[in-house]
Image: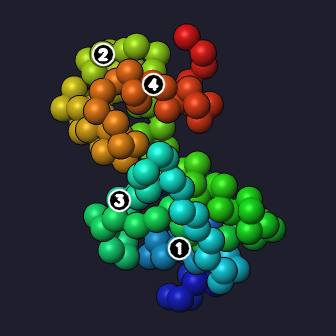
Amino acid sequence: MSVCGTTVAYVVPVDDNRERATCTACGEIHYENPINVVGTLPVWGDQVLLCRRNIEPRYGFWTLPAGFLELGESTAEGALRETDDAGLSPREVEVLRLVADGLSNRAIGERLVISDKTVGRHVSNLFCKLGVHNRAQATRIAMERGIAGEL
């Protein structure tokens, strides 16, 4: 039962990757997570990886990779998941995979049925989140994370 008294259905909310109890009337998401939060301090050379928050609270602010544990998840598994995600939405992972495959923005847009401008925005966000300046660097990270196969 939801806050408004309507039944809930288990669906995958937008920008999530697992089913959540969601009110069928008002759309309220009822998270069933332990209250523990895990995070990491990833260091690359002399730099620390920060992620720009893509959800409220504090949308757009910079933070370390962190989040709530999921049910049945160990702290190590949760920390690894949060760090591997690095703040990329499922759509951004999809765009990164296509960038790594060597597709142009136009070809990516045609494949995903979105505008070139939208693809450009996704690519720009990816570069920022990954801390890279070009497609070759993004491709290297995609390969390191297993998002793209070997070339």
The quarter of the picture where the C terminus appears is top right
Element carrying mark 4: helix
| Residue position for label 1 | 29
For the residues labelled 2 and 3, say whether their Cβ atoms are less than 8 Å apart: no
Instruction: Kindly identify the residue that appears in the image at 65 percent across and 83 percent down.
Output: 35
Gap between marks 2 and 3 measured at Cα: 25 Å
The quarter of the picture where the N terminus appears is bottom right
Residues 50 and 98: in front is 50
| Residue position for label 4 | 139
Gap between marks 1 and 3 measured at Cα: 22 Å
Upstream in the sequence, badge 1 or badge 3?
Answer: 1
Residue 122 in sight from this viewpoint:
no
Upstream in the sequence, badge 2 or badge 3?
Answer: 3
| Residue position for label 2 | 104
Residues 118 and 142: in front is 142
Residue 133 in sight from this viewpoint:
yes
Upstream in the sequence, badge 1 or badge 4?
Answer: 1
Upstream in the sequence, badge 3 or badge 4?
Answer: 3
| Residue position for label 3 | 52
Q: Amino acid at mark 1?
A: Ile
Residues 65 and 26: in front is 65
Front label number (2 vs 4): 4
Instruction: Kindly identify the residue that appears in the image at 67 percent across and 70 percent down.
Output: 69
Element carrying mark 1: strand
In the image: residue 30, left or right of residue 28:
right
Gap between marks 2 and 4 measured at Cα: 13 Å
The image position of residue 144, as x and y in percent, is 58, 31
